[in-house]
Image (cartoon, coloured by chain):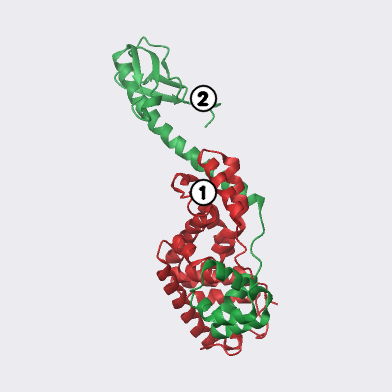
Amino acid sequence: MTSCLEVRRLAPRFVALELSPGDEREFREHLAGCAACREAVAASEPTLALAWRIAAEAGPAEDERFVSEVLGQIHQRQLEHRLRGRRSWVVAAAAAAVLVAVLGGTAVVRQLSGPPATSAVATVAATRPGPAATEPAFIEVEGAGVRLYQLAQASQSRDAIQVAFIVDPHLEL
Amino acid sequence: MVVLRLLARETVSVEHDDRQLAALARGGDEAAFAALVRRHQAGVRRCAARILCDDEEARDIAQLAFVRAWENLSKYDAAWAFSTWVYRIASNLAIDVLRSRDSRDRTHTAHLRIVGDSVGPSAPQDLQEGEVRRIFAELAELLTPTQRAAFVLREVEGIATAEVAEALGCSEATVRNHVFQARATLRRELANRYPEYLPRGGGR
């Protein structure tokens, strides 16, 4: 333990922020238990007394709710990030689906956006929309979370294609 | 008696443990990250509250700091304590808040939040709990955001100059400069506004 004499000797260097971390730790440990030395040091730098009084005030207590709120925010941001990725995937898949529907037949839809490693291959069964198509064509895309797209003829216009996005309500987002 | 909260910071073994937890968290281990949040939340919130002089805003900033830490774990340099890194994120967020704050309105709000029905400086020999925070909140408005953060981290929290420099992203010499400038302003304003609170023989 540093003596009072040593503390008084080191005080100017402490005030000048020149003590090594180890010396400063010992210096502060001494001050914590020695009111006379605290007073002597504060006399040379009065703002230290202010800082010590602020430090002496109780801070926030440990709060488990804080931890769960942090994790909740992390999950929320992860979800938002994933949804953003999926939205871009849906747009790309929808564009591909429209093209396939126009051409008709069986086609392979490749994911146009997203990581190449996860590019989805879907078997698509679609028919050219026309007056005879009473049932809308379905395109099922596997492995992308979004389960189903439905292509249907627009009610009034022969040339327009109505695209409905149906997302499985049980889909875990 | 003033009880000093002096560098009662992590021991070496705790720091090692922090780094292990950080490594696990980097691999996606949420439980490990939750343990880090649990361990350091009080310090980060306390530090942010002292920089901002606003407990509620400090809680939000501390939470955001941990969220940013999680999202940037790949950038964490284990040469530094995990706590230093989170202090860095929180300090910079707090400095951003100070820069964007409408100082006059925010100061008024902060005072209301901190001291409630506070009385004036009527007990010069013994600052009451909360009163010192009111005075610091008032005087700190005269400091630049970086001076304020440097003073809190170095003088109030007692964090080593090198760590403060890492936290504020500047050199140790710059940290000292910020602290000295903060001290000079606080010393002058204490003498002008609250001379009764100056230590005996102080106020050079």
* Label 1 CA crowd tier, 10 Å (few <14, some 14–19, many 20+): many
Q: Residue at x 61, y 49 (%)?
A: A67
Report x, y in % for residue B78: 49, 50
* Above/below status of A34 relative to B98: below
The tint of chain B in the picture is red
Secondary structure category for the residue under label 1: helix
User: Which quarter of the figure has residue B120?
Assistant: bottom right
Report x, y in % for residue A156: 34, 21
Q: Nearer the viewer, residue B47 or A98?
A: B47
Task: Give the residue number, with chain letter if any, for mark 1.
Answer: B67
Q: How many marks?
A: 2
Q: Nearer the viewer, residue B92 or A74?
A: B92
* Above/below status of A168 relative to B147: above
Task: Give the residue number, with chain letter if any, for mark 2.
Answer: A168
* Above/below status of A159 relative to A34: above
Q: Residue at x 50, y 58 (%)?
A: B90
Q: Nearer the viewer, residue A144 or A1?
A: A1
Q: Nearer the viewer, residue B1 or B97?
A: B1
User: Which quarter of the figure has residue B177?
Assistant: bottom left
- Can the viewer see residue B130 in this picture? no
Secondary structure category for the residue under label 2: loop
**Residue found farthest to the right:** B1
Which chain does tag 1 point to?
B
* Label 2 CA crowd tier, 10 Å (few <14, some 14–19, many 20+): few
Q: Which chain is green?
A: A
Taking B153 as reference, is B3 left or right? right
Which amino acid lies under the numbered mark 1 shown in the image of this protein? Val
- Can the viewer see residue B104 in this picture? yes
Q: Residue at x 65, y 86 (%)?
A: B124
CB atoms at circles 2 and 1 under 8 Å apart? no
